[in-house]
Amino acid sequence: MPSPLRRPSRAVLAVWAVAVLAVVTACGDAGGLRGAGETPTAVGPARLWPELAPASSPAFDFDEAETKVIKGVRVTGGIHEVDPVAIVRAEIEGEPEQYSGEKAEFRETARRMADCADGPGKGRCPVLRPYYRDLTGDGRDDLTLGFRQLPGTLTAVRVYTVDRHRLVRVMHYEDALSGVELAGHSVIVRSPSEVAGYEYRLQWTWDPDQKAMLLTQDEMLRTAGRTTAPSQSPSPSQSPSHALSPSPSPSHALSPSPSSAPSLTAVPR
């Protein structure tokens, strides 16, 4: 029969108590909790003009939740099989008032599409290198694409997904850009501001109810002293939902061109 359990002797308990007291005392000497000073008094928001009736409809149309099926581009397999240059050509053909004719705003873009024989991101081709990442959360890669709006300094940013073998544009924006980033299910666009030391930061995030990327943040941020996290080059072993995969190329880094094209980097989740 096994011997019954015995309580520790008083001597053992005394040694243990001294050891614990020594540790507590040492921790207190190393630095305990310290006061951070007085806490500012919280001030709640003050509602202005409560007598005004709430508006029932927006005053301006910001094209929120606007999607578009790109005609002439059928996806038989995955989105990786679709030629990014063909996508931009289809967009140009779908908006002739913008890209063709003497009064077209971006006619130079249409002209330079003839220089895209070697693929996007090469030579005078206005189409930038495409990036692939799951932004809609369905486990399949979506396409983030950019192309220059010429003449001028505008850059078009697009996000496409595939729905029933159709190429669907779920986000579009044009601006003079200083950078584009992907984070989670969001696209972050940074643009220079006319106010020195500041920049605009806009964020679009996928909304599963609207089946589109909505503008969820619109900020004006100070740039002086801002530090940027180093861009990460995902390894081939990463899953599609966590990897920012550029199109096949000898170099995976999108280096700035003489025309100051914006960079696209991955932001850690």
Image (spheres, helix red, strand yellow):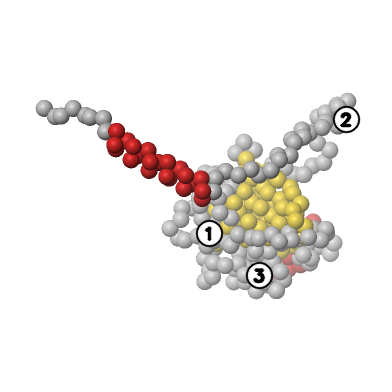
Q: Nearer the viewer, residue 57 or 54?
A: 54
Mark 2: secondary structure: loop
Q: Where does residue 76 sit, x and y in percent of width and height? A: 51, 52
Q: Residue at x 15, y 29 (%)?
A: 3
Q: Nearer the viewer, residue 39 or 4?
A: 4
- Of badges 3 and 2, nearer the viewer stands 2
Q: CA gap, disc 3 to disc 2? A: 49 Å
| Labels 1 and 3 touching (C-beta < 8 A) | no
Q: Earlier in the sequence, mark 3 or mark 2?
A: 2
The residue that mark 3 highlights is 256
Q: Earlier in the sequence, mark 2 or mark 1?
A: 2
Q: Is residue 147 left or right of residue 162?
A: right
Considering only vertical position in the picture, is 35 above or below 124? above
Q: Residue at x 68, y 64 (%)?
A: 262
Asked where in the image residue 58 lies, by quadrant, the reply is top right
Q: Where does residue 174 sit, x and y in percent of width and height? A: 74, 56
Disc 1 residue type?
A: Ser
Quadrant of image for the N terminus: top left
Q: Residue at x 81, y 29 (%)?
A: 56
Disc 2 residue type?
A: Trp
Considering only vertical position in the picture, is 250 above or below 97? below
The residue that mark 1 highlights is 245
Q: Earlier in the sequence, mark 1 or mark 3?
A: 1
The disc at residue 49 is 2
Q: Is residue 53 left or right of residue 123?
A: right
Disc 3 residue type?
A: Pro
Mark 1: secondary structure: strand
- Of badges 1 and 3, nearer the viewer stands 3
Asked where in the image residue 175 lies, by quadrant, the reply is bottom right
